[in-house]
Image (tube, rainbow, N blue to C red):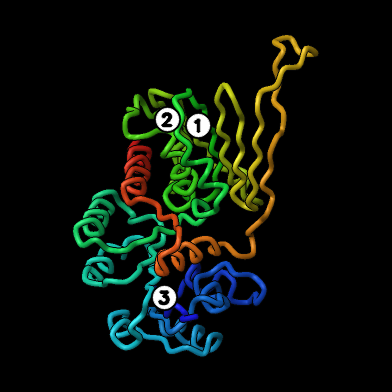
Amino acid sequence: MKKIKSLIIGLGNIGMDVDYENNKKRLSHSSTIYHHRKFELIGGADIKKNQRKKFEKKYKKKSFKSYLDAIKITKPDLIVISTPPNTHLEIINNLANFKKIILLEKPLSDNLKQAKRIASLINKKKLNVFINYFREYIPTFINIINTKSNLYHQCHINYSSSLRENASHHLSLLMNIFDDKKKIINIKSLKKGNKTKDAIINFSNGEIILVSNKIKNYEINNVKIINKDSFTELQLNPIFIKTSKIINDSNFKNGKVLSNIDKYSKEIKDNFFKHVYDNIYNYINGKKFYKIPIEKVLRTEKLIDEIEKV
């Protein structure tokens, strides 16, 4: 089996540091690729000398200050971009003629104008880009978030840390419920903050209630999807899915209650990106794969931009 030669641009938190001291967990791109039997870690690039030294010490692979030099020398099959969002446009622009695979960390950028330019470049140059909203590559998640429905939906989001870097995961999961034909009627800001915001987002077929975590000693990350037929809870960390449907019960006044009928409890807390890399491998080898459409990613960025401006 030919391994996929992989180069990482950006050796910060998600690129390397998040699990640097833990050899059992696969939470960074460096660790995930290094331990993946179908991928080969061939190098890393970072402008910070200390990060390059750490990378070489642990993974025994060459590192580079210039990612363009790294690409030229290593000739990768896959480039992972895990640099800060405000650097993505420049990097994608410099990779406009790269014909192989790019895995780009979310969000596309730190502002909508640059996000649109990135999406335009991806489409114009027909770049093979996977966006790392990693939960959306989990098969059970794919089935739920891509199911079309004409029902009215009420969705509740609880998120921690920043709107753009954290809540974007949650909002992206719901973009297919509130599709392009649904008009945003109103966005009402409940609480302003430097990086977080609470909001009620009204669509013609439902609403999203977005609430940031105010209790700072632990994180809350979940999405609840409610309609007249079912109640679905997506716990994002640790990951599980619980689905309840309506059943008849004469013991209650209206004769109907929720009953738990399904639970996806296989946690991937120790291997965040497994399904992402599995889909990239399948794509390269002509097997069934899933890739988040860039149009869907851009819709998420547009919604975040509107929320930020309230």
- Marks 2 and 1 in Cβ contact (< 8 Å): yes
Few, some or many C-alpha atoms within 10 Å of disc 3 (few <14, some 14-19, many ≥20)? many
Question: Which mark sits nearer the N-terminus, 3 or 1?
Answer: 3
Separation of marks 3 and 1 at Cα, in angstroms? 36 Å
- Amino acid residing under circle 1: Ile
Instruction: Assign the C terminus to one quadrant of the image.
Output: top left
Residue 36's place in the image compared with 43, above or below, is above
Q: Position of residue 126 (x, y in %)?
A: 24, 61
User: In the rendered image, which residue does mark 1 sit on?
Assistant: 209
The span from disc 2 to disc 3 (Cα, nearest Å) is: 37 Å
Counting residues from the N terminus, which is met first, the one under dot 2 or under dot 3? 3
Describe the element under mark 2 as helix, strand or loop: strand
Q: Seen in the image, is 271 located left or right of residue 101? A: right
The x, y position of residue 231, in whole percent, is 61, 30
Per the image, label 1 sits on a secondary structure element best described as strand
Identity of the residue drawn at 47% across and 50% down = 162
Q: Residue at the spot x=58%, y=76% of the render?
A: 20
Q: Quadrant of residue 200?
A: top left
Is residue 261 left or right of 43 when viewed as pictured? right
User: Looking at the image, which residue sits at the far left?
Assistant: 124
Q: Nearer the viewer, mark 3 or mark 1?
A: 3
Mark carried by residue 201: 2
How far apart are labels 2 and 1 at the CA level?
Answer: 6 Å
Element under label 3? strand
Q: Position of residue 250 (x, y in %)?
A: 78, 12
Label drawn at residue 272: none
| Residue at x 32%, y 71% (from the top left corner) | 100
- Amino acid type of the residue that numbered disc 3 sits on in the rendered structure: Ile
Vertical side of 291 occupied by 199: above or below: above
Residue where numbered disc 3 is placed: 8
